[in-house]
Amino acid sequence: MIEVLYGLKISEGSKVNFTQKCYGLLEPVESQIKSKLAASKIAHADETGILVNLCLQWMHVMSNEHFTFLRLQTKRGPDAFDELLLQYKGKLIHDIFKSYFGLTNSSHNPCGSHITRELDSL
């Protein structure tokens, strides 16, 4: 954007430095979001496929009414689950994807929209 607007090219090294600085500044925010989600009584989990550089990847989400944690992963299913989801102890709202039912720390509550979608496909 800077190159388009101002005609200035930013070096790859500067981009790496900017990214590392932003990561460092956002790390405490991510920790707080994960902590709040872990303590919540009810949370939602889902994943959706997205293309990244023309390759299928999975955007995993865990959220409640106040916080959302997004995580990009090359896999879908139990191998892709974050520690936050694996250790969550509350009521987990999710789709009918079999992998979620393998989580043993949380209670399972299928999402109403997903139940309706499953019934409509019968």
Image: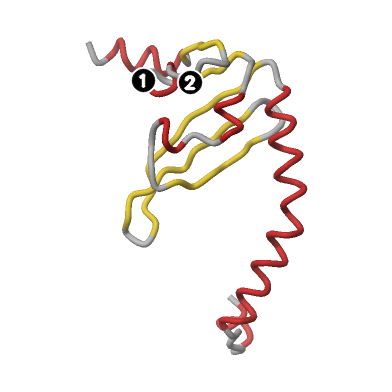
Question: What residue lies at 44% left-to-right and 38% top-to-bottom?
Answer: 80
x then y, percent, for residue 3: 58, 83
Residue 74 coordinates in the image, percent (x, y): 39, 48
- Report x, y in % for residue 15: 61, 76
Q: Quadrant of the N terminus?
A: bottom right
- Left or right placement of residue 96 versus residue 14 in this view: left
- What amino acid is labelled 2 in the image? His
- Quadrant showing the C terminus: top left
Residue drawn at x 70%, y 63% as measured from the top left = 22
Q: Residues within 10 Å of mark 1 (few under 14, many from 20)?
A: few
Instruction: Give the label on residue 94, or none.
Output: 2
Q: Nearer the viewer, residue 114 or 29?
A: 29
Name the secondary structure under disc 1. helix
**Label drawn at residue 86:** none
Above-or-below relation of 25 to 88: below
- Residue plotted at (73% across, 42% down): 31
Residue 67 placement: quadrant = top right
Q: How many marks?
A: 2
Report the residue that reaches farthest toward the left. Answer: 122
Q: CA distance from mark 1 to mark 2?
A: 10 Å
Q: In the shown orientation, is residue 58 left or right of residue 44?
A: left
Viewer-side label of 1, 2: 1
